[in-house]
Amino acid sequence: MAGITELLIGWNQGDKGALDRLMPLVYEELRHVARRRLAVEDREHTLQSAALVNETYLRLVDQERVQWRNRAHFFAISARIMRRILVDHARQRSAAKRGGGNPKLSLDPSLGVLEQADLDVVALDEALDSLAKLDPQQARVIELRFFAGLTIVEVSEALGISPATVTRDWVTAKAWLFAQLNQAGNVGQDP
């Protein structure tokens, strides 16, 4: 992990080769995160984990204003980028279908809200944007846990808050998110 942090700092300082040395170290973990995210997407999803990681990599390379702090910060930014890619892809697919609704995403059991629910990925994105207006920290906690699969401790490190605060925000934000999606009819019933 220290190697990743050192490479991120080198990248901050303009060492373009640091990124080339960083990617082999983080590629498999990014691929694992991408597989988890795509595994809960509906069966008609056409995006593959390698394509998601590659697109994430291309967008990471364009991140010139980010001052990388550590591994958790890197994966937090990666999660946000993956979220944007998945939402953009869902919107494109929805627009391509005549009369079709937005693609569905199964709510990850790690979110702890429902185990077998269908969720509109665009609705999830909109709900997270609404939550971010009310409480940006809670929205980031959900994003990091749901999209990046970070642990409570990793989220704590990425956001610079205590694990107890992360846990409290996690519980509160899950309840708020569930209520919003359920109210809007974007969460399916258990089969």
Image: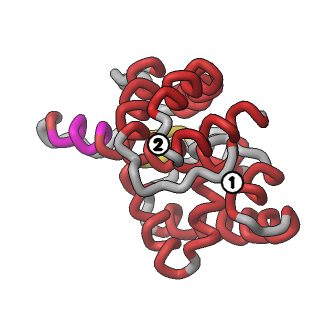
Name the residue located 63 percent from the left edge and 50 percent from the top edge.
73
Coloration of the structure image? secondary structure
Q: Name the residue furthest right.
A: 164
The residue drawn where x is 68% and y is 34% is 4
Name the element at disc 1.
loop
Residue 178 vertical placement versus 82 (above, below): below
**Mark 2: amino acid:** Gly
Query: What residue is at 35 percent from the left and 42 percent from the top?
Result: 62
Q: Residues within 10 Å of mark 2 (few under 14, many from 20)?
A: few
Q: How many marks?
A: 2
Q: Which residue is mark 1?
A: 113
Start and end of the magenta stretch?
Answer: 89-95
Q: Are marks 1 and 2 in contact (CB under 8 Å)?
A: no
Indicate whether 120 appears above or below 170: above
- The stretch drawn in magenta includes residue 92: yes
Q: Give the main secondary structure, helix, strand or loop, of the magenta stretch.
A: helix
What type is the residue that disc 1 sits on?
Answer: Val
Residue at left 50%, top 72%?
132
Q: Which residue is mark 2?
A: 14
Q: Quadrant of the N terminus?
A: top right
Q: Viewer-nearest of labels 1 and 2?
A: 2
